Image (cartoon, helix red, strand yellow):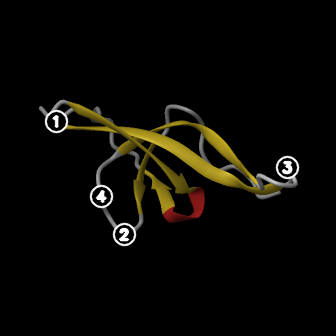
Amino acid sequence: MEVRKFLPGDRVQQKKGGPVMEVIKYVTERDILTGTTLSDTNVECVWFDEGNRHTGVYDQRNLFKVTSKSGLFKT
């Protein structure tokens, strides 16, 4: 089991770029047939673009924590 790097509410961004997102929760990926855990490092995130809410699931190894104090909405 890999260490979880983020907490719900943390601001993150993909290493390859993209919007600043907020962590919602960790999502455990399981094998449908056997029920065994395949990965517990996936993070569900939310971000807003032009007033529209988007969500996505990302591997925590592809994210870094953003220290900016700005919100998710562009002002």
Give coordinates of residue 24: x percent, y percent: 52, 34
Give coordinates of residue 14: x percent, y percent: 41, 60
Residue at the image point whose x is 40% and y is 49% from the top? 66
Whether label 2 touches label 4, CB < 8 Å = yes
* Disc on the earlier residue, 1 or 4: 4
Whether label 3 touches label 4, CB < 8 Å = no
Whether label 1 touches label 4, CB < 8 Å = no
The amino acid sitting under disc 3 is Gly
Q: Mark 4 sits on what residue?
A: 18
The amino acid sitting under disc 2 is Lys
* Disc on the earlier residue, 3 or 4: 4
Whether label 1 touches label 2, CB < 8 Å = no
Q: Mark 3 sits on what residue?
A: 35
Residue at the image point whose x is 51% and y is 64% from the top? 62
The amino acid sitting under disc 1 is Lys
Q: Mark 2 sits on what residue?
A: 16
How many numbered tags mark residues here? 4
Q: Is residue 17 above or below residue 45?
A: below
Query: Label 3 to label 4, Cα distance in Å?
Result: 33 Å
Mark 4 closeness class: few <14, some 14–19, many ≥20 residues within 10 Å: few
* Disc on the earlier residue, 1 or 2: 2
The picture quadrant where one finds residue 41 is: bottom right
Mark 1 closeness class: few <14, some 14–19, many ≥20 residues within 10 Å: few
